Image (cartoon, helix red, strand yellow):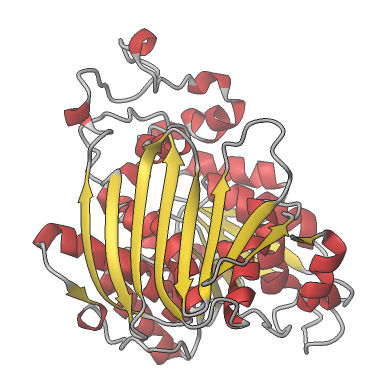
Amino acid sequence: MEALNRRKFIQHTGLLAAGSLLSPLTGYSYRREKQRLAMVGTGGRGIGMWGTSVVEAYSDIVEFVGLCDINPGRVAYAKNQMKVACPVYTDFDKMLREAKPDTLIVTTTDSTHHEFIIKGLEAGLRVISEKPMTTDAEKCEAIFEAEKRTGNKVIVTFNMRYTPYVEEIWELLRNGEIGDIKSVDLNWYLDTSHGASYFRRWHGERQFGGTLLVHKATHHFDTLNYWMDSEPEEVFAYGSLDFYGQKNSPIHHTHCRPCPHKSSCNFYWDITKDRGAMSLYVDHEKHDGYLRDGCVFRKEIDIYDTMAVQYRYANGVPVNYSLTAFSPYEGFRVAINGTKGRLDAWIKSSMPTGVPPYQEIVITNLFGHVKTIQVIPQSGGHGGSDPRLKDKIFRFPDSPDRFKQSAGSRDGAMSALIGIAARQSIETGKIVKIADLTSLKPLAKKA
């Protein structure tokens, strides 16, 4: 059994070990002036992932010069929470004209990402987009055209690539531990707390998030693309709404606070007990009507909660993927089969007390020899991935990308397009070819 403790892990991942010792003002041709940041979209993700934490960790090299949101109350709250002095806007174009940022962070609803990405590229900005990059093939194409037209590029923030666990699997595969990869199975489970939260929010409506095959699964598909080092070629899928939504419950309402079924609903959420949610959302819902404690059985829900996708990479490797949004526990199982053996990984997030503080990867060769690797998670959000991702973006943008974790528009598109193709396949009952969706032609080996 091999354990990757912190010392070994740092030796094992020399990039960050070296990078953490470097001043942002020396090496890698890094600029001396502070980056001028603007952010559009000041919901929980924007404030938490790209707001407060960035101010706290990178104020020596970055400065927020503008915040924008369609909700004036929410953007004012964001400014207060982030403890910044910049002006706030509800007019994005006005923010670009007046604040004069050099970097734009896009954290709006998924279906509007493309609008701000394109305007940012056209303004000559460094654009950082939350995942998914966008929700439809036409919007992907519009982003590609804007990159070609302007010569500027978008960064897509796939933080899963930066988790020690995902990185370790990538390196094991690159080192040929199981030989040539021949097939993959990935099953992802969202529990009745995390899973339900998507149906409570705007993500439960396809027009905003493109379904969980795009919003949530883009993480999973990108990780598989990253591990396989190839691009998806064709997709077939099934999907249904089996648990949430109005048709699946005799009791439902618009949102939880006025619901007459509070005492009998397992999904009743008393948002009034969450001071943060009250301050960010409820106190400002009068401006845009967004109800953060939406009923998980409301009639507007039109996405899938049960999904099964089969797709094939351009290098011939087939994938079986599933996503269930109402599991009793949270986590995933992945099995990767190769010519020399098999890699198994299993993470169960909703763990009982007493489970060892490490994550295991099991390599079994074709004749039964087993090797177990223990990966110790690092501190920080999302298992240690968030600080590493933000270090690469803000502090050491020109550092060597040893583990190929940086992602651009092609990566953003290839992960989203699997979900977009799966959605189309569910609707038509047909296999969908990725090459038919945009101008991108899938590569057997990623460029």
Please tell me whether residue 270 is drawn above or below residue 210 in the rendered image. above
Residue 434 is left or right of residue 194, and the answer is left
Quadrant in which residue 248 is drawn = top left
Residue 409 shows in the view: no
Residue visible at 10% across and 62% down in the picture: 428
Q: Tell me where residue 200 appears, x and y as whole percent.
A: 38, 34
Residue 66 is left or right of residue 260, and the answer is right
Residue 227 shows in the view: yes
Please tell me whether residue 259 is drawn above or below residue 82 in the rendered image. above
Residue visible at 54% across and 35% down in the picture: 280
Residue 240 is left or right of residue 331, and the answer is left
Which residue occupies the foreground of this view, 433 or 345? 345
Q: Tell me where residue 213 appears, x and y as whole percent.
A: 33, 57
Q: Tell me where residue 264 appears, x and y as whole percent.
A: 34, 10
Residue 252 is left or right of residue 20, and the answer is left
Which residue occupies the foreground of this view, 376 or 361? 361
Residue visible at 32% across and 71% down in the picture: 417
Quadrant in which residue 356 is drawn = top right
Which residue occupies the foreground of this view, 73 or 207? 207
Residue visible at 71% across and 50% down in the picture: 358
